[in-house]
Image (cartoon, rainbow, N blue to C red):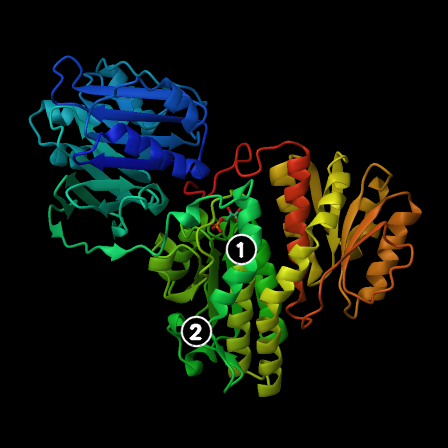
Amino acid sequence: MCGIVGYVGPQQAAPVLVEGLTRLEYRGYDSAGVAVLNPRSSAHPSRVVRAQGRVRDLEAALPARLAGTTGIGHTRWATHGEPSERNAHPHTSYDGRVHVVHNGIIDNFALLRSRLTEEGVELTSETDTEVIAHLVARELSAGLTLEDAVRAAVGQIVGTYALAVLDAQAPERVVVARNGSPLLIGVGDGEMFVASDPAAIVRHTSQVVLLDDGDFASVTADGFHSFTDGEAKTARAAVTLDLTVEELELGGHDHFMHKEIHEQPESVERMLTGRLDDRFGTAKLAGLNLEPRHLRRFERVKVLGCGSAYYVGQLGASMIEDLARIPADAEPASEFRYRNPIIEPSTLYVVVSQSGETADTLFAVREVQRKGGTVVGLVNAVGSSIAREVDGGIYLHAGPEVAVASTKALTHMSIGFALLALNLGRVHDLSFADGQRIIAGLRAIPGQIAEILAGEESLAAAARELATAPSLFFIGRVRGYPVAREGAQKFKEITYRHAEAYPTSELKHGPLALISPELPSVAIIPDDDLVERNITAAQEIRARGGSVVAITHPGVDLGDAATQRIEVPRNEVELDPILLTIPTQLLGYHAAVALGEDVDRPRNLAKSVTVE
Ligand code: F6R
C-alpha cells in the first residue's frame, strides 16, 4: 500500500526522502510527494512538492534547491479519491502550518469533512487524510504543542493510521502516530528517520524501533520519545534490522520478480538450515511455542491467508492432512473475519503472510484470539504486526520480496507448511521412516528448483506463445489444484490476461464448452495416482481444438494429450506441488515481459494490503 518516510538531521531532507520513496515504490505508486521544513527561510518555512505518477515524476517536479533538514514523504496507492496531484500526500492544513502523510483509512472522514466545512475550512482534496492536517492545525492554534495537537486530533478520528506530521513552527521535529498501519523509527548518528517499511531507511541505519498500535513519538535529530494516548511515556528499544541494501538492488536482473525467482534455491536452503531433525525424523520449530504434547491436542487445522497466500494455504492444508492425518482446510482470511466464525479450542489456526501486515489476515488473528483460539503464523517480515501478535510461528526467511507479484515468499510458505505438517505428523501417526523420507525430500528441493530454473529458455518460449491468447485455463486436481490457482493468479496479475483456474475433474461439468483453439490450457499433470485421469482430461481438451501446456514429471507418457511438455523433477508426492509451481512463476513472468508490461509494478495492485 502507501509508503511513508521521514527525516530529521543535518542532511538536506529532500534527497533522503526521495531515495526512501524510491525503495518504497513497490508498495504503492500512483502519486508521491514530500514536505520539507526550512527554518532559515522566512518566506518559505515549508515547501510541499507532489506529483501524480511514479517517484521519478516527483523527482522531476522538485526544484533544483529544496532546502530543509526536516521532512516527510509519501508514495500513494489511492483509496479515497482518484490518483492525482491534489490527492497526493503530504496534505496541508488551511493555515499552511501543518503537513501530514498518512497510511490507512479514516472511517469517519465524511463526518469530519462536513464538520470542518461547516466551520469554514475549505477542503482541497478528496482524501480522508486531509482532515487530519486541519484537525492538528486547529489544536495548534488553540495553543497546544505539536505532540498534544496530534494526540488531540487522533482522538477525533476513527480508523487505521500511520501518521507523520510536521509543524512549520516546530521545524526540528516530526511527530508520528500508529494504529493499525506499520510504522518505525530509524536511529542514526545525530539523525533520525521515520518509515512505514525498513526498506526506506536501510541505506542509513540498521537500528530501528518498531512502534505499536496506540504509540505516538516525537522525533528530533538526537533522539525520540514515545508516548501513548494516556500520556504515559513508553520505552521502545531499538532492534537490529536483518536487511541489507544489496538485497534491495536488482543485482543484474531486469526485474525484481526475476531476481526473486532465481534466489529460491539459495533462500530455501537457508530457510531449511537448522530446521531438520534427522534424529527424530521431524522439524525443529521452537518458534511455534507449542510442546509436542500441546500440538497433539489439536484435532483440526484451519489455515487463513489472502490471495496467493491463501492458495499456498490450501496446499498446506493438504500437506497437513496427508502427513498428520488430521482434518485441515484453508479459507480466505478476508472472508473468515467477516462471518462470525466459530472458534474451537481444539483447532490450531495458522495464518500465512509474506508482509505480516495484510489487514484482513491481521484481523483474522485478532478474531481467533478474541474468542480464545490458538493462532500461529507463517510470516516472512520479521517484527511485522502479524508476527508480533500471533501466539507463535515459523519465520519464512525468504529475505525481502520487492516485486508485487509474490514468488519466492510463496515457495517459502509451502516449505513452512511442509515443516509444520511434518512436525504435526510426528506427534500423530507419521512414522520415523516417513519423517525421514520427507526430510530427504525437503533437502532435495533447492537443487531441484535450480534444475527447473535451468530450463528457463523453453519455459520462456511457452510463455510467449501463451501471451498471445486473450484467455486461458490453468487446471489441476487435488494437490495440483492450488498449483493451478496460483499459476492463474500470477499470470493474470502481471499480464492482465484473463486466466482461470479450474479443478481438472470439473471441466466436463461446464467449462469444456469454452475450449477452442483460442483458449489454451496449462495442465498440472504430476505422476501420481490420478495421472491417467489427468491425461484423459487433457485429451478431451485437445479433441476440442484446445492446446495444452503440460507441467509434468519425467517418464509420464502424455501421448498427444499435450502440445508442449514442461518437466519438473520428481520429489515425494506430498512435496511435488512445491516444485510444480515453479514453472508457473516463469510462465507468468515471461508472458508479461513478452507483452511489455511493467512486471514489478502491476497496475492497481500493492505489495501489502494494509486496508480492509
Ligand atoms: C499475489 C500476491 C497477493 C498476496 C496477498 C497476501 O502475487 O502477492 O495475492 O499473496 O495480498 O499478502 P501477504 O502474503 O503479504 O499477506
The earlier-in-sequence mark between 2 and 1 is 1
* Residue 171 located left or right of residue 34: left
Say which of marks 2 and 1 sits in front: 1
Residue bearing mark 2: 285
Seen in the picture, residue 92 relative to 400 is either above or below; the reply is above
Q: Nearer the viewer, residue 296 or 432?
A: 432
Q: Residues within 10 Å of mark 1 (few under 14, many from 20)?
A: some
Secondary structure state at the residue bearing disc 1: helix
| Residue under the point 48% across and 75% down | 298
| Residue under the point 60% across and 60% down | 314
Could you say where residue 20 lies in the image, as x and y percent from the top left? 34, 37
Could you say where residue 121 lies in the image, as x and y percent from the top left? 24, 15
**Residue 287, quarter of the rendered image:** bottom left
For the N terminus, the image quarter is: top left
Residue bearing mark 1: 263
* Residue 136 located left or right of residue 390: left
Could you say where residue 221 lies in the image, as x and y percent from the top left? 14, 39
Could you say where residue 605 lies in the image, as x and y percent from the top left? 52, 37
For the C terminus, the image quarter is: top left
| Residue under the point 63% across and 50% down | 585
**In this orientation, does residue 591 appear?**
yes
Question: What's the residue type where badge 2 is placed?
Answer: Leu
- The dot on residue 354 is none
Q: Kindly report the distance in space between the C-alpha atoms of the residues bearing marks 2 and 1.
A: 23 Å
**In this orientation, does residue 107 appear?**
no
| Residue under the point 11% across and 22% down | 141
Question: What's the residue type where badge 1 is placed?
Answer: Glu
Q: Residues within 10 Å of mark 2 (few under 14, many from 20)?
A: many
* Residue 99 located left or right of residue 244: left
Q: Residue furthest front?
A: 252
* Residue 490 located left or right of residue 140: right
**Residue 109, quarter of the rendered image:** top left
